[in-house]
Image (cartoon, rainbow, N blue to C red):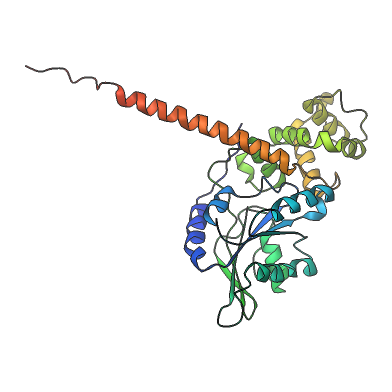
Amino acid sequence: MAIQWFPGHMNSTKKAIVDRLPDIDVVIELLDARLPGSSANPLLAELTAGKPALKLLNKQDLADAELTALWLAHYQAQPGTNALALDASETAPARQLIPACRALAPLRGGMVKPLRVLICGIPNVGKSTLINTLAGQRAALTGDEPGITKLEQKIVLANDFYLFDTPGMLWPRITVEHSGYHLAASGGIGRNAYDEHEVALALLASVRPRYAERLQARYALGELSTLSDEELLADIGRKRGGLMAGGRVNLQKAAELAINDFRSGAWGRITLETPDEFSTWWAAGQALDAERQARRERRQRSRGRQLPTGHGDSG
C-alpha cells in the first residue's frame, strides 16, 4: 500500500517557498540521517534548482556512522552542495552551518548584502530544535508530532545572516514505496496516514539484512534467518509483553513496540538505506510513475475517440 500525507497547509508552504526564493542565497535542507534519501524532498529539489545547497543530516547519533559517511560523500559530490552531519540539540555542531553557508555564497555578507538562508525539511525532522539551538532561545515551536510549525519565521543569527524557517513539507505523491514506509517509521508522516502493522513489517525487512544481531540482542531471539517478517514481529510481541488472553500475540502492540524502539534508538545506530539502494528505488519508482502516466493518457485518448451517445441523426 502506498503511503501519502499532504495536509492542506503544505500547499501554502510550497507557495511561501516559491515567493521567498528569489531573495534567497543558500538553501538548507534538513534530512534524517537514518533515511537521507527518503527524507530529501524531490519537490524542494525542483523548486530550488540552481541555488547553493547545504544538506544537514540530523539525528546522526541514531544513524550508522559508516553509512552517514557514505551519504555525506554522496551529497558533497554534487555541484554547489555541501553536507554536514549533526545532532540538532548540540550547539557546536549546529553553529558549523553558519560558516558552511558563507562558503557557499562568498559574495554575500556584511550589512549591505546580508546572507539570506532558507531552511526546509520534512515534518518532524528536527528543524525547530535546530533553530532554537542556533538562536539560543525558544525561537520555534518543537514537538514529537509532524506539522508543528505552520508559518514562515525569520531568525537573525548574526547582523548579516538571516535565516528563514518554513513549515515542514512533504510532496504530494510519494512514488518510492520504501520511502513511504521509512518516513512513516521515522515519524515524518502523520499517524492517520498509515497502518502501523504494515509499516513495522516493512521496517523489519529493511533492518534485518544489516542489523539482524541488533534485533537478536534487543529481544533475546535466536537465529532470524528462518523467520518471516511476520513471525519476527510476533516474536517481538511475545518478548515485550504483547500477549493477549490465550497466549495470542497482539500484533498491533508488537508493531508499536518495534516502531518506537527504532525511533528511540533502542536497536542501536541504524540507517535504513544507502545512496546506491535509494538510487535503485528512485529509478524504479520513476519508471512505475511513467507507466501510470502513460496508461492515464491512453485512457484519455480512448475516451476522446469514443463517439457521443444519444445524439443520433434527426429528421
**On the image, which quarter does residue 261 sit in?**
top right
Q: Residue furthest left?
A: 315
Q: Position of residue 30 (x, y in %)?
A: 67, 57
Viewer-proximal residue, 173 or 106? Answer: 106
Above or below for 132 versus 289: below
140 relative position to 308: left or right: right
Kindly indicate the quadrant of the structure image that contains residue 239: top right
The answer to whether residue 243 is above or below residue 25 is: above
- Report the residue at 86% width, 22% height from top: 226
Quarter of the image with the N terminus is top right
Residue 198: horizontal and vertical position, in percent? 69, 32
Image quarter in which the C terminus is found: top left
Which residue sits at x=81%, y=51%? 62
Q: Is residue 196 left or right of residue 290?
A: right
Please state the horizontal and vertical placement of residue 119, each as a whole percent of the image: 62, 63
Q: Nearer the viewer, residue 88 or 218?
A: 88
Instruction: State the image quarter where residue 302 is shown.
Output: top left
Q: Position of residue 146 (x, y in %)?
A: 64, 52
- Residue 137 seen: no
Q: How many marks?
A: 0
Tell me if I can see residue 306 in this picture: yes
Q: Is residue 104 above or below residue 271?
A: below
Viewer-side residue, 247 vs 136: 136
**Vertical placement of 164 versus 109: above or below?**
above
Side of 157 relative to 234 (left or right)? left
